[in-house]
Amino acid sequence: MKKRYFYCLLFLAPGALLSLIAATAITGTTAGFLWIFVFGDNTWPTIVERGLALLFPLTFLGLWIAFVGAGFMTGKRLEVDPGLDKKHIFASITLTIAPLLFILLHQYRVGNIGPKPDSALCGDFCADKGYSTRGMPPRDSDDRSCICYDGNGSEIIKLPLENLLSNESQ
């Protein structure tokens, strides 16, 4: 296989991930700018809504094609050199795994994967028991408890989080 095609494949996966992240950021920034500075909470013209809907896939595809094209050009330039540069393969693997790892770590930190945060455990408990809302003492206090309130805001039940954790594991 010629190096130009190998480098296209080498740039394919990291290019897709980086294009996805960049297209999301560009589309979000554009929508935010239009909302804050142009249209606000008023009705947006249909053409702008359709334009925003097309912006994401077009940006993603354009960037992805640019990454694969950069891989093609890099491979074409390196065809005169014999052998493969292991640093390029390592960089491709790193640029593929690193964004996925950052996404997983972020989702773990915010509680979407892994153990639930204390506030989610308390909220689930109070909702399951039919109470209106829940509350917790400040984090810097030594009081680790869950408080459930009724519709009037009166405290109905207060239990230690350890009780919720033991109920969760059963």
Image: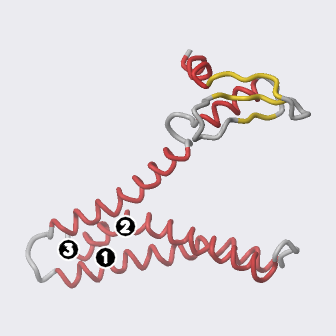
N-terminal of the pair, mark 3 or mark 2, is 3
Q: Nearer the viewer, mark 3 or mark 2?
A: 2
Disc 3 marks a residue whose amino acid type is: Lys
In the picture, which quadrant includes the N terminus?
Answer: bottom left
Q: Secondary structure at mark 1?
A: helix
Could you tell me which secondary element the residue under label 3 belongs to? Answer: loop
| Residue shown at the point (91%, 34%) measured from the top left | 152
Q: Residue at 63% x, 23% y: name it.
A: 160
Circles 2 and 1: CB atoms closer than 8 Å: yes
Q: Residue furthest right?
A: 152
Residue assigned mark 1: 71
Please give left or right for residue 104 compared with residue 47 in the image: left
Residue at x 9% of width, y 71% of height: 83
- Of the pair 71 and 153, the residue shown nearer to us: 153
Q: Residues within 10 Å of mark 3 (few under 14, many from 20)?
A: few
The label on residue 12 is 2
What residue did someone put label 3 on?
Answer: 2
Q: CA distance from mark 3 to mark 1?
A: 12 Å
Under mark 2, the amino acid is Leu
Asked if residue 66 is positioned above or below residue 56 in the image, the reply reads below
Residue 158 relative to residue 89: left or right: right
Outermost residue toward the front in this view: 141
Q: Residue 67: x, y in percent?
A: 39, 76
